[in-house]
Structure formats: C-alpha cells, structure tokens
Image (cartoon, rainbow, N blue to C red):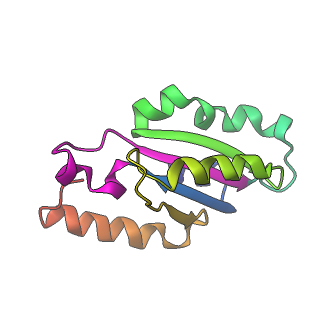
Amino acid sequence: MRAGLHSIGVTQGFQWIDGSFLEHIEDVEARSPNDVDVVTYAFLPAGQTQVSFLPTLQPYLDRKRVKTTYKVDHIVRILPHVDIRDVCYWYSLWSHRRDGMWKGYVEVDLAPTDDTHAAGLLAAKIGAGFQS
C-alpha cells in the first residue's frame, strides 16, 4: 500500500500504525492478527488540490478495497488541514487496549527512503521462519 501511495506522489507526511500485533495477540489470545490499522497523514503532491487529487487518491480511500487487497484498515487525512480533535480521537482509541491497559502505536515517516531496507529485513525474517 505504501508503494502505491508513493507511486501517486504521496511521499510527505507520516503514518500511524496500530493493530492487535502490537499487543502480542498471538500469545494473548492464540490467534493471528486479522489486519493492521493505519492512518496516513499526508501532504498533497505539489500543484494538487484536494479536489484535483481525489480521483488519483480514491483507490486508497476505499476502505473495503484496501482491507481486502492489503489487509489494512486505512484512513487518509490531508495535512495541514487536520483538526486537533482528529488527532485526539486516534490517540484516545489507540493508546489503550480494550481492557484499559496502556499501549502504544507506531509512527513511520511516509518518505520511501527506508522502505527497501525494511522490506529486506522482513524478507530475511520470513526466510528464517518468522510468521508474517
């Protein structure tokens, strides 16, 4: 999904990543995670407006398609037009487990700079028997 966003020029911003994988759900509930939750906070490519870029971005706004294709529950927010209430919402939702225990989530820069290296590390782990 990140490569797709990069291919349409969405390379500036960050992604917040959450999901049951951060809670070791495999050990806690003896099940695999069903998906990963991602909120992409991104600046539009130069020269684009929300209206002009909407058709290009649309495939990544279609939550059902993204979840089916990538196993990602994905939300996009356009910077700098983010309401502080939106940030507070995701923080409050993702900073605790369902049982109230504090937990974290991950922030990853949207720039593709380290993606190739990260993909290589994942491939090595999977090759060594790590379950993806």
Residue 45 falls left or right of residue 27: right
* Residue 7 in sight from this viewpoint: no
38 sits left or right of 75 in the view: left
Q: Nearer the viewer, residue 41 or 30?
A: 30
Position of residue 48 relative to residue 116, above or below, is: above
**Segment tinted magenta in the rendering:** 20-42
Q: Position of residue 97 (x, y in %)?
A: 41, 50
Q: Closest to the observer: 105 or 64?
A: 105
Q: Position of residue 67 (x, y in %)?
A: 44, 33
Counting the numbered discs, the total is 0
Please tell me which residue is depicted at 23% across the width and 44% down the height of the picture.
32
Judge whether residue 69 is colored magenta.
no
Picture coordinates of residue 68 (x, y %)? 41, 30
- Residue at 31% across, 71% down: 121
Query: In the drawing, does residue 106 fall left or right of residue 32?
Result: right
Q: Residue furthest front?
A: 100
Residue 91 lies in quadrant: bottom right
Let me know if residue 31 is in the magenta part: yes
Please provide percent x and percent y for residue 25: 26, 50
Residue 23 visible in the shown view: yes
Residue drawn at point x = 54 percent, y = 65 percent: 108
Residue 99 is left or right of residue 74, and the answer is: left
The correct choice, above or below, for 87 with respect to 55 in the image is below
Up-down: is 54 above or below 122? above
Between 29 and 75, the one nearer to me in the picture: 29
Name of the residue lying farthest toward the left: 129
